[in-house]
Image (spheres, coloured by chain):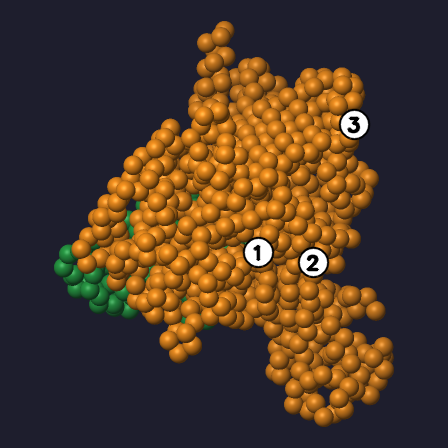
Amino acid sequence: MSAKNSITLHINGCDHTVSVEPRKTLADAIREDCGQTGTHIGCEHGVCGACTVLLDGEPVRSCLMFAVQAAGKKIRTVEGLADGDTLHPMQQAFMDHHGLQCGFCTPGFLMLAVGVLEREPNIGDADLLDVLSSNLCRCTGYHNIIKAVRAAAKKMSGQ
Amino acid sequence: MSAHGTRGAGMTWVGRAIRRLEDPTLVQGQGRFTADLPAAHYVRFVRSAVAAGKIRKIDTPQGATVITAADLKTVKPILPMLYKFAYRPVAQHVLTDGSVRFVGEPVAAVVAASAGEAEDIADQVALDIAETTPVVDARAALEAGAAQVHTAAPGNVILEGQFKTEGFDAAWKGAHKIVKVEARSHRQNATPMEVRAGHAAFDASTGRVTLTCTTQMPHLTRTAIADVLGFPESDLRVIAPDVGGGFGQKMSLAAEYVVLVWLARKYRSSFAWIEDRRENLIAGFHSRDQTITLEGAFDKDGKLLALRADIAANVGAYSCFPTTCGVEPLMAMAEMPGPYDVKHYQCRARGVLTNTCPMAPYRGVSRPVITFTLERSMDKAAAALGLDPIEIRRRNLIDKFPYKTAMGLEYDEASYKQTLEMAVAAIDVPAFRKRQQKARAKGRHLGIGFSTFCERTGYGSPAFAARGMAITPGWETVIVSVDPSGFVEARIGSSPHGQGLRTTLAQIIADEIAVPPDMIKVVHSDTDLAPYGWGTFASRSLVISGGATLIAARKVRAKLIKIASTMLEAAESDIVLEDGFAKVAGTDRTVAIAAMAREAYTQTHRFKGDIDPGISETGHYDPPGTFSNACHVAIVEVDAETGKVTVERYLVAEDAGRIINPMIADGQVHGGVAQGIGNALLEEIVYDESGAILTATLADYLPPTAHEIPPVELHHLETPSVNSITKAKGLGEGGTIGAPAAVINAINDALTPFGVEIDEMPATPQRIRALLRGKERAA
């Protein structure tokens, strides 16, 4: 254990000033100190991607970052996707295409897909498959996730 | 009136791919999982780093709270029981009481204010263990003079089943050809994306403990923990909130949960344990570790006359609760003959103790392994007899139902041959063979593999009793109520965790009582709110809980009609329920179901004692079991230089009886096939000779990613089951059962020009290359 640092995490437009040990991961800080439990932890070694959040628009594994490294950056989590009662097109598409079963990996997949499509709205099929293969899902067999992301991509680009 | 007389304008909710009622919260990150709950104290388990030995001393840091077996003297061990098959009961202390028997076994529990602190302290706990020689492999454990894992099980055999049909020897002698396969299935881990977690909180005002945990069977978890801790079950509430996949791993009792409840009661506070992925991979239950020698006796036409199987399941260091470690070897023994007509069968099935993580059910339980073994033997027999692999299956698949197997199981009406033909037609085998030839000429190796199987689902308590189980988790109870506001609630004993049961049960109820699914709430996985039930496993919930739901909903329907008959002053036979109303057929006289519900609670005097107050009905269901079936086809490409296998195309023709929600049913098959492909190609828990585990991260144990899984083409048949009142059969495990056989048969087809065969799963690049290298050296 070592001394705690006071940092401010900007999550979904809100500032959370929290006191964390330097070793605390961003995933743990988001969940435990900021109370945003939609970000899930599946492996804590950067393989499964359940903890994916957007950091200044880029998908990152929040279990592989320290919270102090995220101070001052814009963090987006699954809780920030919907606009009030209106679901984000990606959330809606996952429901429409049965892209989730137990729902544990879902927040990570949603953030991964939203992050990539915001950066690269016209991403090709092969590249999208590459991106989506960076997260693990044990329930769906992936193809409904791929379908959902494709459908959301259309909506997001206004097609 | 038919069961679906309320369908309105020719429409039923059953059979429609409606969106899941579960999804809105999950996609918004508002699901509630066990690890989301804060606790006053966090627990870290200190686990044995050696596979076998005696504990000499446990050194703990000064001032730390560290619980060991010495503190738990009043806690009874977990003692799963079977009353047949020469089962040797083996006790498991929740914290080991002097001996360690596998790497990862919990020895002590460290308690601290945060998970991080608990982990720091756990690192400072020193275990002084006098190591002894472990047995890791089942074959080694069976050798004379092998070290004993438990003195209660001499020779390391914890159970042994034997079976032989009368007249077997004569049938065997009459065979034209005996075909033998030595199949090896390596050890695997179900790997739910959410690892296990528990949170036990003491409530000082009631003296009760609430255990929130990632279980698939909340009620039995309560029963088991109250038993070993010796206190009234009513003092424990078990909740399985949102659970992030289980696949069987979470149906077995975690000893860690017992420690949490003990701590909560002793210290009158809240205690949480969140497993990490390493713990899950080394100590969160394993499965599939089996060796099967299967011989098939065929006549000259390729008809299977008799089967002889020798099954050895490496069950690890303890027997899991509640199924016991008999679940793998005994299911293998009972279901080995699969979908084929074979009169004679001989089998020996043994459960073998070793110094490895205990085995527990994992999606498919044994059947991925026995289907793989049987389907390999069909392909080998076809080759030996000069038959096409499809033709030999045609000649042996059962096509008359009901069918009684050699071991006495009764198969209900199904479509074993039809699904095979459906798959064969859809895949276009002649076109593939041409393509295969052309590819071979260019040095590319394609192969096609078939797998036909039947899957026992939705079986009731007699099926478990036949296995000699002390606990027969067969039946289910459902209570359907209409509240005074007209909304419907179904309290169920099943415990879904991703299967979409809230949606499918709502569809069943909606058709009965003419209330739309979004007005129907399914309440589950809380022992305070749900009736006693067994949970969700073994492809049972839609059949058994669905059946109990239908029974309860029909009673509610009958009551609504009775109330309507009084309120509308019409004969019950003239009342129809439609779109939220009761109507007198052929008139414009109607009353809203919500208004009837209000009356049933608030105006009971109107019913003059003829109708009981309120609307709440209970259904129980304990069915005989029903067999769904499928044919899987895989087309793969094997890179002979690297041993890499790519699944190019995957097709399933399946029959699970009546489909309640096609979207959800397809999703179960897709996900099952993905796990089966992972099991076939990638996933393996590896121990070294000392019993240390080499695959303790997800970079070593490899669930498939989107890259490895092709789209799954699905074809459906619906043979309604007479053994299921909803006519639905279970299908949760079929995808996983069929895939290893189809994929590995396809690999073998691709490897035909090399003259090598692989009868091992997973068929990793290393194994394939080793076979090819062996051949290259020989040449």
Quarter of the picture containing the N terminus of chain B is bottom right
Q: Nearer the viewer, residue B694 or B428?
A: B694
Q: Position of residue B147 (x, y in %)?
A: 42, 30
The residue tagged 3 is: B167
Q: CA distance from mark 3 to mark 1?
A: 40 Å
Chain for disc number 2 = B
| B299 with respect to B105 (left or right) | right
Q: CA distance from mark 3 to mark 2?
A: 35 Å
Choose top left, top right, bottom left or bottom right for residue B471: bottom right
Chain for disc number 3 = B
- Tell me the amino acid under the disc marked 1: Thr
Mark 3 and mark 1 residues within 8 Å of each other at the beta carbon: no
* Residue located 68% across and 47% down the image: B466
The residue tagged 1 is: B536
* Residue located 63% across and 26% down the image: B294
| Residue B502 in view in this figure | yes
The residue tagged 2 is: B622
Please tell me whether mark 3 sits on a helix, a strand or a loop. loop
* Residue located 44% across and 61% down the image: B229
**Precedes in sequence: disc 1 or disc 2:** 1
Please tell me whether mark 1 sits on a helix, a strand or a loop. loop
